[in-house]
Image (tube, helix red, strand yellow):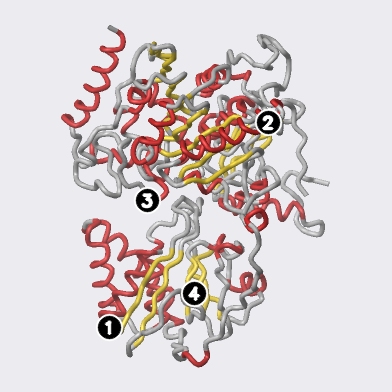
Amino acid sequence: MKTASRIVGTAFFMTGYEVQDAPRYGAERRGAPIFAYVRADKSPVNERGIIRQPDLVVVADDTLVGMPAAGVMQGIDEHTVLLINSHENADTWRQRLNTAATILILPAREDIKDRAELPYIGSRCAAACAVLTNVISRDVFTSALAEELEQLGEKIVKQNLDTALTSFELMSPYAGIVKQSGLPSAADYQQPGWINLPFDDAAISAPAIHASATSVKVRTGLWRTMRPVINYEKCSGCWWVCSTYCPDGAINVTEAGLPDIDYEHCKGCLVCVAQCPPQAIEAIPEHLAKEQEMSAADPSGIKPPGDSA
Amino acid sequence: MLTFSRQEPGRRKQTGNEGIIMTSESIVHFHRMKDMPSSHLLGTGTPMCAGCGGLETLHNMYDILGEKTVFVNAAGCMTLLSVYPFTPFRGGWLYTAMASAPAGAQGVRDAMDILLQKKKLSTEDNMEVVVITGDGSAYGMGLSATSAAMDRNLNFIYLCYDNEGYGNTGQQYSAATPHAAITSTSKGSHGYPGFKKDLFSIWAAHRPAYVATIIGAEPLDLAKKIEKLQTMTGPRMLISLAPCPTGWDYDPKLSVEIGRLAVQTGIWPLKEYSDGKIKHTKIPKQRKPVEDYLKLQGRFKHLFEPQRDEAGIAEIQARIDAYWTRVMA
């Protein structure tokens, strides 16, 4: 996403805009949400910091939409265009999010099973931005992309460009849908809703955690793009392999001595799949696993496969 | 409301008691993988990367050490373990600056010793102080404080999770980075020009109670070493190689395989020091070629693509061979 913001920023710049583009990092770990911002205007941009009222929000990974920490929906209102890279359609997202924003879908590639694999996603998203704002020409976009990715070599630039230009076609019906909003003026500035806390002794105010293992409240299972599933017909019950090797300790052992994966917390590293001696653990795409769960849980809906009753 | 009912750490066993000798200190003897604990003390839901080799070491170590532990954590990836109001620990945790975890440990140890002396803390509530730092701290900026703690014979355990670079900030090279690895600050066509510092020998030269190398991919060797150091007092020092999908650039599911290959190729010798003697605890009978280990990692890709760098690979292999020749002599 950082690269996408750089491509868009450079393209705006080449078109004659004043530009800011900046990534925002949290922890540097795989699976951590990452944001990048681009501000562009024909006149000098004096505003700094994160963008509070975006004209366009592009979501490369749709699993982030539901994650409060990612804050995808922050500052979105009826003038915002929300573009989501997703297997699902705009109607589904509209119902799910109940937002006044315009929702568009950048269709996720059907051949991609593991959502951690998002090939050329930065370039695809950048190209979509170019079309939706309708101020960046194809030629300028091409030069901007080539400039930003130059160090990766010609071959990679070409692969990115070819993929990115398909976004140009896909998004062309929506060209210019993103409208530039007025510059926020200093007079409109509203102070954040700070809550004043009186100063307390260190014993009270220090961030001490008194309960144990509170981290279990954090659902790291949301990180997962592939889900390890144990086939108990094949499982030989050697829990000491998977339960010990699971870096997160997210494989419990049942009374019967069988491993049981804690999906609330399993991050989907798939070490268990790689290490299982009888190869009884299979990795399936998380969104497919969720769909199966949902149809199985719906009492009025489709019965699970193999249920003939 | 969180409730946990747990058996005593170190005793948790699923079935049977075969091969288990319980002493008054309820020590389990780890003979085979089956003897590993079947439930885990370290809370899930930590922000470590999926497939983190350091977390694998820590959770196995914690299962054996038990909850009567205070972790003193220098700045690094694992600082993120405990971000208010979430912690995976059941005992104490203290955050220190990068260079000063052993000094923090001294303070905690002294405080508890004073409370014990004054009988304000019962021996039953006494806790083990465990320093936990990455290699940036252990091999580099925290080395002086560590040396001084060993000089003072501080009664503590030190775990260095060594992912061979400053992982939390984007894998810049550290004094633990191996020769030829690409890092974000050694991007040239030959990678990092320096050589991994021999921290085991530096630590052992202080003649502390115990020094060992471990790895999460060899849990039994790890368990035996933790069990052994629990019977000792004084500085007990551990370096765990921590395969790092993010910094080493490989698929997270290969974390255990890469760790095991580090041992089988001999690039990560498992050994221990005590009483002035060094003992290798797992000697690979037939060492695999080091390229088996290197070729799985993106940080060594330049040794294989676009052309195979025979000289580069041979140089790394020669250093490993020389090490083992010296050891086995």
Residue named by callout 3: B170
Mark 2 crowd level (few <14, some 14–19, many ≥20, 10 Å Cα): few
Q: Residue type at mark 2?
A: Lys
- Above or below residue A99? Residue B104 is above
In the current view of this chain or complex, which residue is farthest to the left? B311
Establish whether labels 3 and 2 are both on one chain.
Answer: yes
Point 77% across, 28% down: residue: A255
Q: Nearer the viewer, mark 4 or mark 2?
A: 2
How far apart are the two marked residues, 4 and 1, measured between alpha carbons? Answer: 21 Å
Pinpoint the chain carrying mark 3: B
Mark 3 crowd level (few <14, some 14–19, many ≥20, 10 Å Cα): some
In the current view of this chain or complex, which residue is farthest to the right? A309
Q: Which mark, by number, is residue A57? A: 4
Point 30% across, 22% down: residue: B289
Residue A250 is situated, as x and y percent measured from the top left of the image, at 63, 38
Mark 4 crowd level (few <14, some 14–19, many ≥20, 10 Å Cα): many
Q: Residue type at mark 3?
A: Gly
- Above or below residue A154? Residue B117 is above
Which image quadrant for residue A134? bottom left
Instruction: Name which of mark 4 and mark 1 comes first in the sequence.
Output: 1
Q: Nearer the viewer, residue B11 or A175?
A: B11
Q: Nearer the viewer, mark 3 or mark 2?
A: 2
Pinpoint the chain carrying mark 2: B
How far apart are the two marked residues, 2 and 1, measured between alpha carbons? Answer: 75 Å
Establish whether labels 3 and 4 are both on one chain.
Answer: no
- Above or below residue A50? Residue A3 is above
Residue named by callout 1: A15
Residue named by callout 2: B118
Which image quadrant for residue B227? top right
Pinpoint the chain carrying mark 4: A
Pinpoint the chain carrying mark 1: A
